[in-house]
Image (spheres, rainbow, N blue to C red):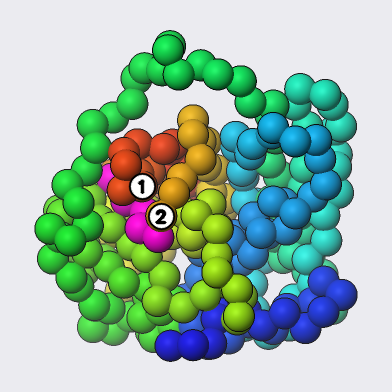
């Protein structure tokens, strides 16, 4: 696969390919690629040297169509130590998603580093799996999946590795953070506890916290979905790269019978 999730049309416009299509509704994107596209824009916001993106929250304002999209950015809260950035993803007539990120200055805290989860078994030890029957082609086929525990086709907690088979933007090599954001939204999918043919479990946002920047092509998802008694759930995912634990992801879920 040589075509990316998106083609850069210039002046902030991008054309989404069929690789972005989600598994349930034809013509609507999986949130992974647009999250990564907005992260790409956030990484390019001018700032002082020695800063890092520490938290990214993507709010879903409506279905993201497989079509032409415009990305704009702004600094919502400037500062010398911390800044709040935002990136908005729009069609020709409406905003469909917004990503807000805290960018922080870095310092040397290596001697005090603590609290990380144990590293996952390497990706090459996992079992490769494909798109489950009944799930639509697109994003899932554009990713390589390897399971250490559970998978898209199984209900319950899961630990999987994922990496892109295609670039984020045609002709570009994605950054490790873009790769991580392309995969992070899949935590709720790999750890779902309900039959998607009978239930909806729709996330309204995805929030990623990072205690260090990722590296490499693979993203590890150690995910668990919690379903409450009132039609609300939460998917919680520890995020890893090939060197260990890098951060966490949380997703609020609307749970409802179809």
The location of residue 122, given as percent across then percent down, is 20, 51
Q: Which mark is residue 216?
A: 2
The reply to whether residue 7 is in sight is yes
Q: Are marks 2 and 1 in contact (CB under 8 Å)?
A: yes
The location of residue 126, given as percent across then percent down, is 15, 60
Out of 83 and 173, give the one closest to the viewer. 173
Q: Quadrant of residue 125?
A: bottom left
* Magenta segment boundaries in residue numbering: 217-223
Q: Earlier in the sequence, mark 2 or mark 1?
A: 2
The reply to whether residue 236 is in sight is no
Q: Label 2: how many residues lie within 10 Å, few (<14), some (14-19) or many (20+)?
A: some
Q: Nearer the viewer, mark 2 or mark 1?
A: 2
Secondary structure of residue under mark 1: strand
Residue drawn at 83 percent across, 47 percent down: 46
Q: Label 1: how many residues lie within 10 Å, few (<14), some (14-19) or many (20+)?
A: many
Q: Is residue 219 magenta?
A: yes
Secondary structure of residue under mark 2: loop
Q: Is residue 35 left or right of residue 48?
A: left
Q: Is residue 170 left or right of residue 225?
A: right
The location of residue 99, given as percent across then percent down, is 69, 51
Q: Residue furthest top?
A: 112
Out of 257 and 64, give the one closest to the viewer. 64
Residue drawn at 61 percent across, 20 percent down: 107
Out of 250 and 85, give the one closest to the viewer. 85
Q: How many marks?
A: 2
Prevailing SS of the magenta stretch: strand
- The residue indicated by pointer 1 is 241
Q: Quadrant of the C terminus?
A: bottom left
**In this rendering, is residue 109 above or below 128?**
above
Q: Quadrant of residue 81?
A: top right
């Amino acid at each position: 696969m040589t075509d990316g999730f998106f083609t850069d049309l210039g002046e902030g416009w991008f054309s989404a390919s069929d690789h972005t299509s989600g598994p349930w509704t034809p013509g609507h994107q999986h949130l992974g690629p647009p999250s990564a596209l907005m992260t790409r824009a956030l990484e390019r916001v001018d700032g002082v040297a020695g800063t890092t993106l520490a938290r990214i929250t993507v709010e879903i304002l409506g279905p993201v169509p497989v079509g032409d999209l415009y990305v704009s950015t702004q600094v919502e809260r400037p500062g010398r130590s911390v800044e709040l950035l935002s990136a908005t993803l729009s069609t020709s007539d409406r905003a469909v998603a917004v990503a807000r990120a805290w960018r922080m200055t870095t310092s040397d805290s290596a001697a005090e580093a603590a609290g990380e989860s144990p590293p996952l078994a390497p990706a090459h030890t996992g079992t490769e799996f494909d798109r489950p029957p009944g799930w639509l082609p697109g994003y899932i086929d554009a990713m390589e999946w390897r399971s250490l525990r559970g998978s898209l086709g199984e209900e319950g907690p899961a630990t999987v590795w994922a990496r892109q088979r295609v670039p984020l933007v045609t002709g570009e090599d994605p950054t490790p953070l873009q790769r991580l954001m392309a995969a992070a939204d899949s935590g709720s999918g790999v750890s779902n506890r309900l039959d998607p043919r009978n239930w909806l479990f729709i996330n309204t946002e995805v929030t990623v916290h990072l205690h260090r920047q990722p590296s490499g092509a693979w993203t590890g998802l150690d995910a668990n979905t919690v379903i409450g008694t009132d039609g609300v759930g939460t998917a919680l995912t520890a995020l890893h790269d090939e060197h260990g634990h890098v951060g966490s992801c949380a997703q609020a879920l609307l749970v409802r019978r179809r």
